[in-house]
Amino acid sequence: MEILKKPLLTEKVAQLTDKLNRYVFKVGHRANKIQIKSAIENMYGVNVTAVNTMKYVGKLKTRNTKAGAVSGRAATYKKAVISLKDGETIDFYSTI
């Protein structure tokens, strides 16, 4: 579970899934494409054709409070876009 953190379920990802049969996951920042591919294939029983990864650096956040300005940083994460073979799908809601 240190390779795959969780699937991302947004409107933009839903459009990718419907049109291009791609799914998006948050993954561990040390995971490479080969490890991600094998983890997806083992966990969901599908054939992965391509893996694209991107790293997001957390934005610097500042807010004003009674005690003065408080600054911090949002979390940094790595995202993987998984392309599946035609005709295969991943059902995230099967266990609900």
Image (cartoon, rainbow, N blue to C red):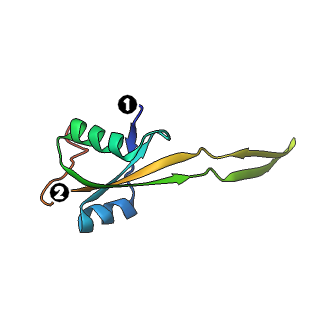
Asked whether the residues under the numbered discs 1 and 2 touch, taking CB atoms below 8 Å apart as contact, a structural biologist would say no
- Residue at image mark 2: 85
- Look at the numbered disc 2 and give the secondary structure of its residue: loop
Q: Nearer the viewer, residue 35 or 95?
A: 35
Locate the N terminus and report the quarter of the image it occupies.
top left
Which residue does the image show at 21% across and 47% down from the upper left? 91
Q: Residue 54: percent from the left, percent from the top?
A: 48, 55
Furthest residue in direction left, as rendered: 87
Q: Is residue 58 visible?
A: yes
Furthest residue in direction bottom, as rendered: 19
Which residue does the image show at 26% across and 66% down from the upper left? 20
Q: Residue 75: percent from the left, percent from the top?
A: 60, 44
- Look at the numbered disc 1 and give the secondary structure of its residue: loop
- Residue at image mark 1: 1
Q: Is residue 96 visible?
A: no
- Kind of residue at disc 2: Lys
Q: Would residue 65 be found to the left or right of residue 28 on screen?
A: right
Q: Would residue 33 be found to the left or right of residue 92 on screen?
A: right
Which residue does the image show at 22% across and 41% down from the upper left? 41
Locate the C terminus and report the quarter of the image it occupies.
top left
Above/below status of 26 relative to 87? above
- Kind of residue at disc 1: Met
Q: Which mark is residue 93?
A: none
Badge 2: few (under 14), some or many (20 or more) residues near its Cα, within 10 Å?
Answer: few
Q: Would residue 43 be found to the left or right of residue 57 on screen?
A: left
Asked where in the image residue 26 lies, by quadrant, the reply is top left
